[in-house]
Image (cartoon, rainbow, N blue to C red):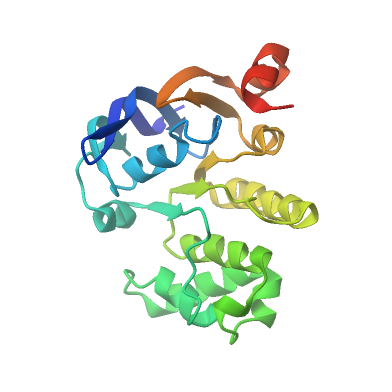
Amino acid sequence: MTALLEVENLRAFYGPVQALHGIGFSIPEGGIAALLGANGAGKTTTLRAISGMIRATGAMRFAGGSIIARAPEEIARLGIAHVPEGRGTFGAMTVAENLRLGGITRGDVRAVAGDIERCLAYFPILSQRYRQQAGTLSGGEQQMLAVARALMLRPRLMLLDEPSFGLAPMVVTHLFDILGRINKEQGVAMLVVEQNAALALKLASEACLMETGRMVLAGSSGQIGADEGVRRAYLGY
């Protein structure tokens, strides 16, 4: 299967401090991969490096073209949508305004309107909150809005940072079901950072385990989830 994202020997830095130490992995077209590990392992840093938010060296190719050292807005235009930890919605703006903002780089007004309808079909509760300020939504609704706004970019790859954080279990299950539908119906590839390892492994086909900025294990989600030693040492269940 053709690789959509290829990462090789990736190093990333916060000022003079090196946070990633030569990691590598790939995601195929339409695939879902999970990045797992303890807090501070470098998972969020990996997403930020892919998005161009921090200084990085090594090789990163998206759809065959290099994205290393490119600006975040350029990377987004190529089709990589980042849903950050903490949701990142614009609280003073309405749901409608947040969604339109997600498609702001696109010039086709009719297509943008159609995509808003498609997003609302995935998240019907947002239709009821359409004219409501995003900051007044529940945590689960804000997370749904963050995913919907990312979809407005028409991405080929979504980077999701802790999508279950702070949400009730029933809401988390519903959200991950929708992510699975988006992947199957629209072919959007996903790279998911998630503390709930069991949930992430259920969604993803591939998984990578990280520790202190290094990749320690990679394989199918089934293999990693079935390894009792790995579960106890890294996954906490």
User: Is residue 166 something one can see in this rendering?
Assistant: yes
Q: In the rendered view, does 173 fall on the left or right side of 25?
A: right
Residue 97 position (above or below residue 23): below
Q: In the rendered view, does 16 fall on the left or right side of 51?
A: left
Q: Residue at x 26, y 36 (%)?
A: 13
User: Is residue 188 something one can see in this rendering?
Assistant: no
Examine the image and state in which quarter residue 37 appears: top right
Residue 204 position (above or below residue 188): above
In front of the other: 63 or 33: 33
Q: Residue at x 67, y 63 (%)?
A: 140
Examine the image and state in which quarter residue 203 appears: top right
Examine the image and state in which quarter residue 34 appears: top right
Q: How many marks?
A: 0
Residue 112 position (above or below residue 202): below
> x, y percentage for residue 170?
80, 55
Q: Residue at x 24, y 55 (%)?
A: 74
Q: Residue at x 56, y 27 (%)?
A: 207
* Rendered-image quadrant of the C terminus: top right
> x, y percentage for residue 164?
65, 50
Residue reaching furthest to the front? 16
> x, y percentage for residue 14?
27, 41
Residue reaching furthest to the right? 170
> x, y percentage for residue 64?
28, 35
In front of the other: 49 or 32: 49
In front of the other: 194 or 27: 194
